[in-house]
């Protein structure tokens, strides 16, 4: 009887967390609708939409991280939640990146002006920090037994490997994800969202226990703000420079190296 009661309380806490995340998704969705109807300036429009998207992503990831650290009812439960909310973000955050690396990729490929990129980066930074402080305020209400405000002020270092390996992991994750993002553009929307969600889930499964597999600088800042304060250089290299390096390698490979290799091979065949 005691075991059943404990299981029921556990389910209540999980449902509360899930309800909280879905409420934020609905709230930001409503805010996006209002923004599209009321704001006319393209810069203000881009700023607010990017802010809301980053806020939603960081908020949900904070709560997902909290759930994943508890004893799951089934080993695949955290991965199921990651897949589900990746699909939710893919469906609701169309037209935004919520990731500085995505903005950087678009600028370098000529799909976005530097001015628009700067506006989006600022919105992402503010959204990431706002989500952190919003989560801290909500956790202080103690809606579940896991919601403890002190948690947000502690550094929970996710890096479980030495610095070179951590750099490689985050760079490879960024390279793979953004390569897929670039090359899945011609795939039907519904299928693309499933493919990207599955890829994110796989990357988190593969690298989550080593670095967290974040490959998003603003998300990393929101999740590990205290760690950036205590070990700035290490976290700056792993979570900011490494994903950016992955983007640069991707662009060099697909825009320069592979076309050069193809042209060289074609020339040799003709000769």
Image: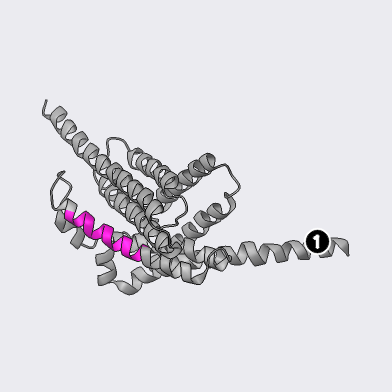
Image quadrant for the N terminus? Answer: top left
Residue 167 lies within the magenta run: no
Q: Which residue occupies the extreme right position in the image?
A: 271
Residue 151 in view here: yes
Residue 134 lies within the magenta run: yes
**Residues shaded magenta:** 124-137
Image quarter for residue 243? bottom left
Residue 90: percent from the left, percent from the top?
44, 46
Q: Nearer the viewer, residue 50 or 150?
A: 50
Magenta stretch: dominant SS? helix
Q: How many marks?
A: 1
Q: Residue at x 47, y 57 (%)?
A: 173
Residue 252: percent from the left, percent from the top?
60, 67
Q: Which residue is mark 1?
A: 266
Image quarter for residue 74? top left
Residue 143: percent from the left, percent from the top?
15, 44
Q: Nearer the viewer, residue 157 or 267?
A: 267
Q: Nearer the viewer, residue 217 or 138?
A: 138
Q: Which residue occupies the extreme top position in the image?
A: 1
Q: Residue at x 47, y 71 (%)?
A: 115
């Amino acid at each position: 009887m005691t075991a059943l009661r404990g299981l029921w309380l556990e389910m209540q806490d999980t449902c509360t967390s899930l309800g909280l995340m879905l409420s934020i998704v609905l709230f930001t969705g409503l805010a996006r609708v209002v923004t599209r109807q009321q704001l006319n300036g393209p810069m203000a429009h881009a700023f607010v939409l990017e802010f809301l998207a980053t806020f939603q992503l960081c908020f949900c990831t904070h709560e997902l991280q909290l759930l994943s650290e508890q004893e799951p009812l089934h080993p695949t439960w955290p991965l199921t939640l990651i897949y589900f909310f990746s699909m939710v973000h893919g469906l609701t955050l169309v037209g935004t990146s919520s990731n500085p690396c995505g903005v950087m990729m678009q600028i370098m490929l000529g799909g976005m002006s530097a001015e628009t990129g700067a506006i989006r980066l600022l919105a992402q930074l503010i959204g990431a920090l706002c989500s952190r402080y919003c989560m801290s305020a909500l956790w202080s209400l103690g809606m579940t037994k896991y919601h403890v405000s002190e948690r947000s002020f502690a550094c929970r270092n996710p890096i479980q490997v030495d610095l070179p390996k951590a750099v490689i992991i985050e760079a490879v994750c960024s390279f793979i994800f953004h390569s897929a993002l670039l090359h899945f553009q011609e795939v039907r929307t519904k299928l693309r969202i499933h493919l990207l969600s599955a890829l994110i889930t796989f990357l988190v499964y593969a690298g989550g226990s080593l670095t967290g597999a974040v490959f998003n600088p603003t998300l990393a800042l929101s999740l590990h703000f205290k760690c950036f304060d205590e070990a700035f250089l290490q976290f700056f290299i792993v979570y900011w420079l490494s994903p950016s390096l992955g983007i640069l390698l991707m662009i060099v490979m697909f825009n320069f190296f592979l076309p050069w290799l193809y042209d060289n091979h074609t020339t040799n065949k003709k000769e």
